[in-house]
């Protein structure tokens, strides 16, 4: 495990073997091994905005590009929106929580008609003991068409996302308690989360959150201003 800098964002990088074992844990082959990855945005003062724009343009042009969007994953916004943002997330990651509670609402409010926002799983059980349970729980909420409300409830939770807590949030958000409990015990959700994890690793996800904006990969948490500049670049560069 090593710490690496990527476009002024910090991430902890793991070996492929750690990801493979974590995926195996999800589908019930082995147990006890997981992974951690994290990222945070460096705060910049307003007087550096012009420098930021130049830096973001360079980062955009140099970003690796992948096809990570999937129709079966939870999403908000028009299917034909000109910009698709895919976030790989961990529900106990503090940077993911901050993004979801502080940045994403403003982003959707300002640009909701221009973006399709999709969420995929990248749980980190080595540092976040309940990350896998939380990821499986949101999959169960998704099956009852309650993904976004339930996800927001988990991300507002300040305590551990134990089985008892994720079930309590299911009741609080109006999900069918019995259906939810049976889903949480079903191994199908393990396979769903494992597939997201393996897909993320294949496409270079080495931290949470990681964003793909029209397929371009950006590791680590991003400010609202950064994401807005990337949206503008996507509209300018990718529009036919």
Image: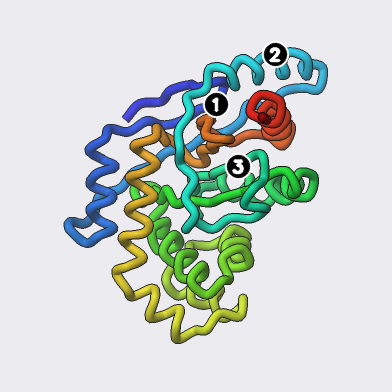
Q: Which numbered tag is attached to residue 9?
A: 1
Residue at 61% over, 63% down: 148
Residue at 28% over, 51% down: 23
**Quarter of the picture holding the N terminus:** top left
Q: Looking at this view, is 196 or 46 the one in front?
A: 196
CA–CA distance in space, label 1 to label 3: 22 Å
Q: Which numbered tag is attached to residue 54?
A: 2
Q: Quadrant of residue 31?
A: bottom left
Q: Secondary structure at mark 3?
A: strand
Residue at 67% over, 30% down: 239
Q: Residues within 10 Å of mark 2 (few under 14, many from 20)?
A: few
Marked residue nearer the N-terminal end (3 or 2): 2
Question: According to the image, label 3 marks what residue?
Answer: 84
Q: Is residue 157 visible?
A: no
Above-or-below relation of 81 to 2: below
Marked residue nearer the N-terminal end (1 or 3): 1
Which one is in front in this view, the residue at disc 2 or the one at disc 1? 2
> Mark 2 and 1 residues: CB-CB less than 8 Å, in contact?
no
> Mark 1 and 3 residues: CB-CB less than 8 Å, in contact?
no
Q: Secondary structure at mark 2?
A: helix
Image coordinates of residue 211 in percent, x first then y, are: 54, 38
Q: Residues within 10 Å of mark 3 (few under 14, many from 20)?
A: many
Which one is in front in this view, the residue at disc 1 or the one at disc 3? 3
Q: Which residue ends up furthest to the right in the rendered image?
A: 47
Marked residue nearer the N-terminal end (2 or 1): 1
CA–CA distance in space, label 2 to label 1: 16 Å
Q: Which residue ends up furthest to the bottom in the rendered image?
A: 178
Above-or-below relation of 175 to 150: below
């Amino acid at each position: 495990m090593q710490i690496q800098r990527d476009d002024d964002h910090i991430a902890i990088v793991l070996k492929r073997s750690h990801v493979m074992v974590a995926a195996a844990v999800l589908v019930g082959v082995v147990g006890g091994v997981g992974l951690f990855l994290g990222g945070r945005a460096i705060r910049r003062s307003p007087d550096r905005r012009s420098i930021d724009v130049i830096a973001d343009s360079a980062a955009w042009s140099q970003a690796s590009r992948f096809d990570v969007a999937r129709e079966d994953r939870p999403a908000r916004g028009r299917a034909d929106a000109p910009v698709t943002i895919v976030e790989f997330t961990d529900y106990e990651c503090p940077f993911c929580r901050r993004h979801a509670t502080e940045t994403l609402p403003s982003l959707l409010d300002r640009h909701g008609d221009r973006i399709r926002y999709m969420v995929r799983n990248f749980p980190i059980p080595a540092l976040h003991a309940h990350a896998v349970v939380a990821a499986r729980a949101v999959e169960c909420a998704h099956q009852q068409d309650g993904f976004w409300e339930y996800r927001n409830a988990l991300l507002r939770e300040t305590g551990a996302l134990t089985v008892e807590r994720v079930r309590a949030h299911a009741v609080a958000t109006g999900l069918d308690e019995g259906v939810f409990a049976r889903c949480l015990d079903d191994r199908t959700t393990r396979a769903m989360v494992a597939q997201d994890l393996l897909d993320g690793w294949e496409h270079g996800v080495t931290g949470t959150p990681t964003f793909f904006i029209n397929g371009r990969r950006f590791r680590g948490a991003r400010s609202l201003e950064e994401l807005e500049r990337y949206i503008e670049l996507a509209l300018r560069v990718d529009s036919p």
